[in-house]
Image (cartoon, rainbow, N blue to C red):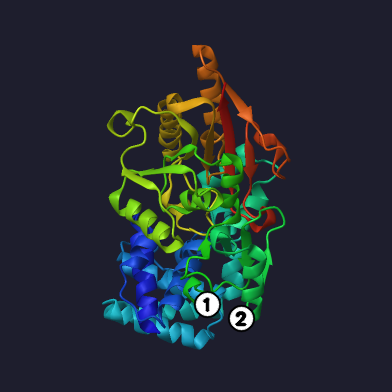
Amino acid sequence: MSNARVAAARAIAGMLEGRSLDQMLGEQALDPDQRPFALALAFACARHLGSARALLQKLLSHPNRARPASLDAIVLCGLSELRHLATPDHAAVAETVAAARRLGLQRQAGMVNALLRRYLRERSRLDASVASDPTAASEHPGWWIEQLRHDWSDHADAILCANNQRAPLWLRVNRRRGSRQAMLDQLSASGLNAEAHPLLDDALRIDPPRPVEQIPGFLDGRLSVQDAAAQRVADWVQPQPGQRILDACAAPGGKTAHLLERCPDAQVWALDIAPERLSRVQENLDRLGLEAKLICANAADTAHWWDGKAFDRILVDAPCSGSGVVRRHPDIKWLRRASDLAQLSATQGELLRKLWPLLAPGGRLVYGTCSVFRCENQRVIADFLEEVHRAGGSTAHLWQPSEPVPGSAEAAPGLQILPGERDEDGFYYAALERR
């Protein structure tokens, strides 16, 4: 499977230079039988990059000497395979060296072999030598650890641990095409282990995960992939027949589709700023047999797309750091910078200020992010509420579900689900009603 290792190393090299792991993997031409291993290796390397980098520094005789990014990437992948995948040691080393040659590293192939074999010989000592490094021990950059300890002092270690786990496969049942119980029965009859979420009506989990194309009900639109935490948004929006509903940051369309599955008679507008992302929304709606009004626009630039009629519901699934979905996208923790948070918070506040006037009296705006950082969540909502109240006129009031949702009490205003709670992603919710 050297081709799979080549693809993984190229993806990691791109990630080290600031590119998305999903984007890099999507550009790799691989046979279908090699793609799962390439993904598993690349994700294992990204998930455990902190310790792998620390080990590489220990293994190199001249760690500060300039090296090709592809050399670092293939060694990092080799270390990750030896430490976290089930490949026999001798096969992992031999195949990694072969992949190095395919990457054009013929002159460095011997070096790759020597580094990996040295790690195997001195494994216990080397692992112990990096254990005191916070980035290596937690597999997160230092600023991220500091931010979590500031925001969630009692939960920081649990969040870091949850982020380093593989994500579960949560599915959403399209209630327009059958009940969840009927879907569970069919999955069980197919030999799959499926379990219903205890608090969410449409959510079920497949364990162990498998490619969705192999799951009965996916291709014909009875199932969609969506984490349980994201599915809770529909319970906060509570779409009703005839309502005008705006999904202001809609791609890839999971929440748009869920609202329509819940209430097909609602008039849903789905906006996104990127044409290619909006096309994914359309593809998802087509597979599920749903219709929405799709608009390619900057949601904050309302003069260019709004028709002047107020919305009964507005969903702002705001652009954010993604700090709550690290177990699904482990590259996020290495690609984000502490300086990104201020810009993201400013964008989130701007969306609220521009979209709030579009909400009808008695309407509800639901704000959500897949972040756990307070500056993107509680602080954004608290600042917005203060700004609205200071301006006078229509007032914004916090809305809460009639039945409390288990979560972290210190998240007020709003609700914070932390990564790993009930095996869900990290997600923040707040709902404001205009009175």
Residue at the spot 28% in from the left edge and 81% down from the top edge = 106
Q: Quadrant of residue 104?
A: bottom left
Residue 249, compared with residue 310, is above or below; it is below
Q: Nearer the viewer, residue 253 or 141?
A: 253
Q: Which residue is mark 2?
A: 190
Which quarter of the image is occupied by the C terminus? top right
Give how far across and how far down residue 134 sits, in percent.
Answer: 58, 53
Task: Give the amino acid at mark 2.
Answer: Ser
Q: Residues within 10 Å of mark 1 (few under 14, many from 20)?
A: many
Q: Residues within 10 Å of mark 2 (few under 14, many from 20)?
A: few
Q: Nearer the viewer, residue 176 or 90?
A: 176
Q: Nearer the viewer, residue 146 or 108?
A: 146
Task: Give the amino acid at mark 1.
Answer: Leu
Residue at the spot 57% in from the left edge and 27% down from the top edge = 433
Q: Nearer the viewer, residue 168 or 149?
A: 168
Residue at the spot 43% in from the left edge and 25% down from the top edge = 353
Residue 35, compared with residue 272, is above or below; it is below
Q: Which residue is mark 1?
A: 82
Is residue 106 among what the camera can see? yes
Residue at the spot 42% in from the left edge and 29% down from the top edge = 355
Which quarter of the image is occupied by the N terminus? bottom left
Mark 1, secondary structure of its residue: helix
